[in-house]
Amino acid sequence: MTFTISKNASTTVRIMPGLFFMLTLTACATQPPMQEPPRVVVDPEPIIDVESVVAQQRELDDAERHRRYVADILYNGLRALRADRLMTPPEDSAFHYFNRALALDPGNTVAEDGLQDILQRYLQLADTASWQGQFDNAELFLRRAAEVDDQHPGIQVARDKLQLERQRTHSVYRIDSRGLRSRHEDVVRQLQDVAAVLAANDIFVLITAPSDETGRWIYAQLQDALSDQRVRADIEIGEQASVRLVLSQNS
């Protein structure tokens, strides 16, 4: 069989059947192969352990409640510290709250610093009491400081100072607060008796009074009773009015 392909009016191309078959195969071989569509790999959904998630959330909630509980205790401790409720009352004191916070959260720096603040405050109170001649109170403050930290070096320093003040003290006269406010004659007579002691000794006077005005009044009573001698004195503000007679270093 012969195939005739007309290219134009004047030319006729004859193709043999075998050649036509070969041309057809060649045309098919030259066509690019069909590509498969890319496969989409879908990761399997992770398996969620609901009980584990719930347990973890419960632990986080418990930790947060614990943190807030400790924070509330520390707040109460700081408030008590500012109010000078250092160890009393026992259940509402800075000492109680800070120790409670440490029991719940060992190493808590706020609580540890708070305890050191209590100790320093007691050392300050002991120093003031020693200076004013309130030696029993000074001893009490030092004992309480030792309850916080009996190894603190400041305690021994304060004890040495207390002992020195005891040795330097000739006598201490406490003045009735009510009589002092009214300038009662009993207070005037008491100060005159103190002035008599001053006249017979080389003594320095430390006046403790609730106000500068009251301290100056006490000093005036002493000076009036010693017209021929000038009273050497210092005035310090304190709740309990007193007159402390301090021996000079040459006595």
Image (cartoon, helix red, strand yellow):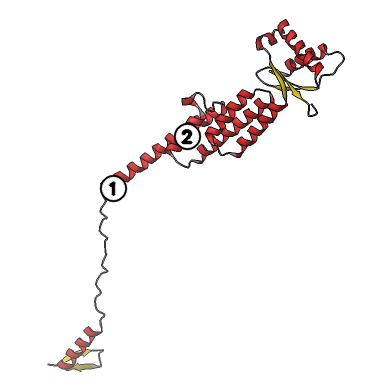
Within 10 Å of disc 2 (Cα), the crowding (few <14, some 14-19, many 20+) is many
Q: Position of residue 94 (x, y in %)?
A: 51, 30
- Corner quadrant of residue 159: top right
Disc 2 target residue? 99
Q: Position of residue 202 (x, y in %)?
A: 81, 22
Residue at the image position 61 percent from the left and 23 percent from the top: 136
Q: Secondary structure at mark 2?
A: helix
* Kind of residue at badge 2: Asn
- In this orientation, does residue 142 appear? yes
Residue 141, compared with residue 182, is above or below; it is below
Along the line of sight, the residue nearer the viewer: 47 or 194:
194
In three-dimensional space, the C-alpha distance between marks 1 and 2, rounded to whole angstroms, equals 35 Å
Considering only order in the chain, which callout, 2 or 1, is on the residue closer to the N terminus?
1
- Corner quadrant of residue 105: top left
Residue at the image position 50 percent from the left and 37 percent from the top: 111
For the C terminus, the image quarter is: top right
